[in-house]
Amino acid sequence: MKHVMLCCAVLALSFAPPAAAQLATTKLYNLVDAPITVTYSASGEAQVVLDAGNSIIQAAGYHKVSVLVGDTHAASFMINMGKISNTTLSQMFTRPTSPHRIYTFDVIGPEFVLWLTGGPPNGTDHVRLWVFLST
């Protein structure tokens, strides 16, 4: 009987996802501690480069994208999610830049980009924000 209970306990633990596995499948783009400078277009839009040298973020393998936009002159932000590189086919999500408000989206495509909208036309801005990808 003890042998059966021990086998059941070992079997149950083997199916429980370890906490380390969850941590290994998250990614934080922290632009709070070191704000970035963006330049708005004539229409007041600026693409945010989250990953050095690449504005297209790979979201495959993640289930959620959370965004918090802090200090900025932009009125809103926009996420385009789907197939972005080369020929684009994506869905757009627009939200206001409400202070202390975290917006979470389901990952519905392999890539995404982040834009700030409603900023000062042809102006620059120092932006604090973070983006968190999780499974």
Image (spheres, rainbow, N blue to C red):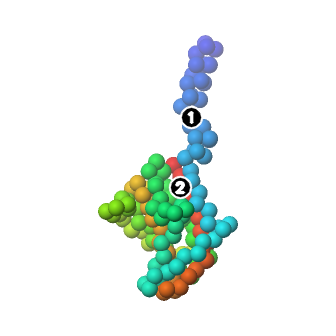
Q: Is residue 72 above or below residue 121?
A: above
User: Crowdedness of circle 2 by 10 Å Cα count: few (<14), some, many (20+)?
Assistant: many
Q: Quadrant of the N terminus?
A: top right
> Is 77 on the left or on the right of 37, as rendered?
left
Residue name at image x 40 percent, y 62 percent: 81
Is residue 94 at least partly visible in the picture? yes
Q: Secondary structure at mark 1?
A: loop
Write down the quadrant of residue 127 in the picture: bottom right
First-in-chain label (1 vs 2): 1
Residue name at image x 51 percent, y 70 percent: 48
Residue bearing the label numbered 2: 133
Please state the horizontal and vertical placement of residue 122, each as a whole percent of the image: 49, 86
Q: Is residue 63 above or below residue 56?
A: above
Residue name at image x 59 percent, y 57 percent: 28
Write down the quadrant of residue 109 in the picture: bottom left
Please state the horizontal and vertical placement of residue 7, each as a whole percent of the image: 58, 19
Q: Secondary structure at mark 2?
A: strand
Residue name at image x 48 percent, y 68 percent: 114
Distance, label 1 to label 2, CA atoms, is 22 Å
Q: Do residues under tags 1 and 2 come within 8 Å of each other at their CB atoms?
A: no
Residue bearing the label numbered 1: 16
Please state the horizontal and vertical placement of residue 105, each as a whole percent of the image: 47, 61
Q: Is residue 106 above or below residue 36?
A: above
What amino acid type should be assigned to the residue bearing mark 1?
Ala
Please state the horizontal and vertical placement of residue 53, each as a whole percent of the image: 52, 63
What amino acid type should be assigned to the residue bearing mark 2?
Leu
Is residue 101 at least partly visible in the picture? no
Task: Point out which mark residue 100 bears.
Answer: none
> Is 109 on the left or on the right of 57, as rendered?
left
User: Crowdedness of circle 1 by 10 Å Cα count: few (<14), some, many (20+)?
Assistant: few
User: Which residue appears farthest toward the right when viewing the image?
Assistant: 33
